[in-house]
Image (cartoon, rainbow, N blue to C red):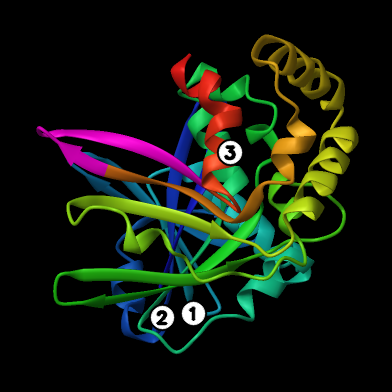
Amino acid sequence: FVISIHRSGANKISPLISAEMNINKIENYLTQLKKTKYDNKYLFEIDELNGSLYFSIVENILFASRDKMIIEDAIRQYNSKVSLLDEVSFNTVHKTIGNSTNFMMYNVQEIINQLSLKFESIKNLKVIDKFSGWNGSDIKIKDNLISTYGFSFKSKNFEYFTDIFNQQKNIDSDIYNYIPENTLFVSSLGFDKANEIEVNKNKFYEKNNINWQYQKNKKEYEKKYSISFNEINKLYDNELGFFSVNINNENKLFSYVKFKNSITASSILQDIFID
């Protein structure tokens, strides 16, 4: 079965459950339910104490949701004969599905859009407004460990911020040799051509009309701290990320950047660290 999340109103999101179903086994049960027709398909309704449950069955595929509009959208989408597999970014990630027990496809940008319904501050972040598209992860659950491994779609179009990492090779992380044992969460990003990331970042900013603001902020920081971003870029090595550690029952988040020469980088950035 598949669980997907959909926008069902200006400030509302709703889940949709899809699963294969042998309709022959429940035909008698279906005759007892309230039903209407939508786009030549039956739409069933089950009254429950906590509200109604709506579902439809199309060619042995069951669509179920608490939101009637979501079921209508699913029926309309099916009848249109247009599939997510027709979308290049989705199809590319979909092909990476492995043989693990579970697999999750998710659209990072849509998740951000849903969060922005609740958090006004997210709406105002222009980079996050076009952060990433489709991602896919194998999920393995064993004993008390949940591990994921997957892929995200990147292209040369610079539509999303993650496109700036296109053609970068992943590098094994060194951060695990330094973080404490009580680390709760760690996220690391490895790359092999730091200079190309800077060039691609500028292309992304230009395409999305935010380069002017970036350059303005960059000049203000360079003047305030007497630094040169171009010189700092030359010091980047091949990894950056963040991790969370529990300190006195409070979660603290730390960011890190790996430099070719940490002593030189520290001397250049010390004013920023102090500030």
Give the foreground label among 1 and 2. Answer: 1
Give the foreground label among 2 and 3. Answer: 3
Amino acid marked by disc 3:
Ala
Could you tell me if residue 38 is visible in this image?
no
The residues bearing labels 1 and 2 have C-alpha atoms spaced at a distance of 6 Å
Q: Residues within 10 Å of mark 2 (few under 14, many from 20)?
A: some
Dot label at residue 265: 3
Residue 51 higher or lower than 219, as above or below:
below
The residues bearing labels 2 and 3 have C-alpha atoms spaced at a distance of 65 Å
Amino acid marked by disc 1:
Asn
Q: Earlier in the sequence, mark 2 or mark 3?
A: 2
- Residue interval drawn in magenta: 245-257
Q: Say which residue label 2 marks.
A: 23
Residue at screen point 70% across, 27% down: 126
Q: Would you say residue 234 sits in the magenta stretch?
A: no
Q: Are marks 1 and 2 in contact (CB under 8 Å)?
A: yes
